[in-house]
Image (tube, grey):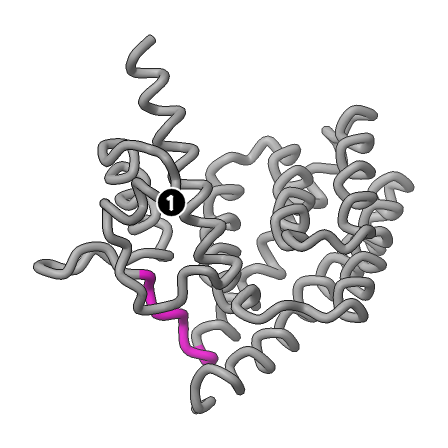
Amino acid sequence: MAENKSSMKSLRAYEKIRDMILSGVKRPGTRLILSELEDELGIGRGPIREALMRLDRSGLVKNIPYKGAVVATPPTLKEILHIYDLRVDLEVKLALEAMAHLTEADYDALESLLDTMETLPKNRYNYDRQFHSHIYEASQLPHLVAIAQNLILSVESVLNIYRWDADMCQQFNREHRAVLEALKAGNRDAVRDNLAQNIKNGLDIINETYSKMVRIP
């Protein structure tokens, strides 16, 4: 029982720190000091240490000797272009596999997530990530899902450093709606085309973000 409680605290710490990084609250290069995180999260050091180790494995955090945990520097633009090529290929495959397993309950959950995204909430990126994850997890290919999630995490810190404007959010919402309708209709070509377009359009945000962060090579 105590072990389960500790695991839950570690998971909660992981999710909160992850979301602070992805939303831009914790910027690249920021030191993640245990005592400060304790105060911010209201969680003890043990679970926070475990969360930081997990974040290190995901690539969002780097544990540097004599310095501690630091928010990782985002990938270069060249690397991100390769990541997006991999994402399109892998995520489309997962979505097509998921079509045979999605249930009415899954579609209800996806509708609910999309309804929330269409209200343009402050933490919209979190619902966006859940929308994609829910589809991919239905593929019943957990190892490939884990790879896809790591690829997504590696670029989301860049995607969310700057707030998206309303027009951009609405565009992504329309793309998600098209993906969902294609899944419901069992239209594999439409799922492939709409999901690939949705993923590729994230590169526009990447380009804008990098123009503000670093000199593009």
Residue at 30% across, 12% down: 2
Is most of the magenta stretch helix, strand or loop?
Answer: loop
Tell me if mark 1 has few (under 14), some (14-19) or many (20+) residues whose alpha carbon lies within 10 angstroms of its own: few
Q: Position of residue 64 (x, y in %)?
A: 16, 60
Query: Is 204 on the left-hand or right-hand side of 146?
Result: right
Q: Position of residue 80 (x, y in %)?
A: 49, 72
Residue at 61% across, 42% down: 133
Q: Quadrant of the N terminus?
A: top left
Query: Is 152 on the left-hand or right-hand side of 182?
Result: left
Q: Quadrant of the C terminus?
A: bottom left
Residues in magenta? 71-78
80 to 34, vertically: above or below: below
Q: Residue furthest top?
A: 1
Query: Is 77 on the left-hand or right-hand side of 208?
Result: left
Q: Is 62 within the magenta?
A: no
Amino acid at circle 1 = Glu
Of 169 and 133, the residue lying toward us: 169
Residue at 37% across, 28% down: 9
Of 49 and 102, the residue lying toward us: 49
Element under disc 1: helix
Residue topped by disc 1: 40
Residue at 67% across, 68% down: 164
Q: Position of residue 90 (x, y in %)?
A: 58, 53
Q: Residue furthest front?
A: 39
Residue 67 falls in image quadrant = bottom left
Of 194 and 24, the residue lying toward us: 24
Q: Position of residue 82 (x, y in %)?
A: 49, 71
